[in-house]
Amino acid sequence: MTLKSSGRTKLNIKVYQELIEKSDNAYFEWKKQWGWLVPEYKLMKEELSSLSEEKKDSEKTKVILGAKRSLKPFPETVNKEYGWICNKEEFKLERWGRDDWSTPPLPPDD
């Protein structure tokens, strides 16, 4: 009984040592091939964190600018979903004129 268990233990230790060796080799191979990316990712992380700080500042400004818009009073309509908000000037999407995109006519057949 003890011989079997000791044999299994030795086998488990050997498998575990091979697993650790493969893991270490994979780490060093990755570092050799892709290690140059690590400083790039650190730089990207710093840039993204600075951009997120700027965005937080701009979001505070947006809240102040959007405060004058209001959806009240909500109209008593049948569908209660759409159509009433487009009459309010502050909710219009066409700020620079109509959005008139039509397909150009086909060239004449010769």
Image: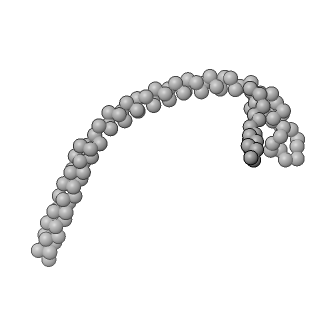
Q: According to the image, what is the colour scheme of the structure? A: one colour
- Farthest left residue in view: 3
Task: Answer left or right for 99 relative to 54.
Answer: right
- Report the residue at 76% width, 42% height from top: 105
In x, y percent, where is residue 37? Answer: 32, 38
In this view, the residue in front, 105 or 38, is 105
> Does residue 79 show up?
yes
Viewer-side residue, 48 vs 71? 48
Instruction: Give the left or right position of residue 39, taking residue 99 as reference.
Output: left
Horizontal side, residue 35 vs residue 59: left or right: left
Give the left or right position of residue 24, taking residue 41 as reference: left
Picture quarter containing residue 72? top right
Extreme-front residue of the structure: 110
Considering only vertical position in the picture, is 54 above or below 18? Answer: above
Can you give x and y, in whole percent of width and height, for residue 59 in the image?
59, 27
Query: Which residue corresponds to the image point at 74% horizontal and 26% vertical from the top-left?
Result: 96
Q: Quadrant of residue 20?
A: bottom left
Say which residue appears at 80% left-offset and 27% top-offset.
89
Give the position of the N terminus as an image quadrant.
Answer: bottom left
The single residue placed furthest to the bottom in the displayed view is: 1
Residue 90: x and y, percent? Answer: 77, 27
